[in-house]
Amino acid sequence: MNVLDFTSTSSASTGTIVLWVAILVWSLIWKGWALWRAAQNKSVAWYILLLILNTVGILEIIYIFFFSGYGKKKV
């Protein structure tokens, strides 16, 4: 069975493709937001770390909510 065979009617292969696309979209959204926050904060080390490591959004979420200062009021 070819994983890239889109003509197959097997629900397992279709489900797998949908799962991979969902993970890809999820990861890209969080990675984009985290990289943008790191660039705005001039956090070079975080930017490089976030760019290199792929953690399916986990590291990105941790950075955004705990290390980037998101949600803190600017005075």
Image: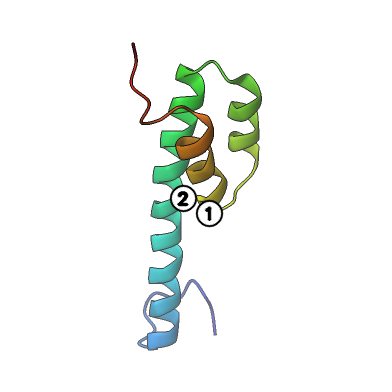
Residue drawn at point x = 51 percent, y = 37 percent: 66
Q: Which of 41 and 10 is in front in this view?
A: 41
SS under mark 1: loop
Q: Find residue 47 and report its horizontal and vertical position in percent.
A: 58, 27
Nearest the camera: 14 or 34?
34
The answer to which quarter of the image holds residue 16 is bottom left
* CB-based contact (under 8 Å), mark 1 and mark 2: yes
Q: In which quarter of the image is residue 70?
A: top left
Relative to 4, say whether 68 is above or below: above
Residue type, mark 1 in image? Val
Residue ID at (53%, 54%): 56
16 sits to left or right of 67: left
Front one among 73 and 68? 73
Mark-to-mark CA distance, 1 and 2:
5 Å
Question: What's the residue type where badge 2 is placed?
Answer: Ser
- Where does the N terminus fall, quadrant-wise? bottom right
- Rendered-image quadrant of the C terminus: top left
Q: In this view, does 22 lie above or below 3?
A: above
Q: Residue at x 45, y 39 (%)?
A: 65
Circle 1: is it few (<14), some (14-19), or many (20+) Cα within 10 Å? some
**Which circle's residue, 1 or 2, is located before the other in the chain?**
2
In the rendered image of this protein, does residue 61 appear above or below residue 67?
below
Nearest to the observer: residue 54 or residue 9: 54
Residue 57 position, x and y percent, is 50, 50
Q: In which quarter of the image is residue 46?
A: top right
Which residue does the numbered mark 1 point to in the structure image? 56
Image point (64%, 43%), residue name: 53
The residue carrying mark 2 is 27
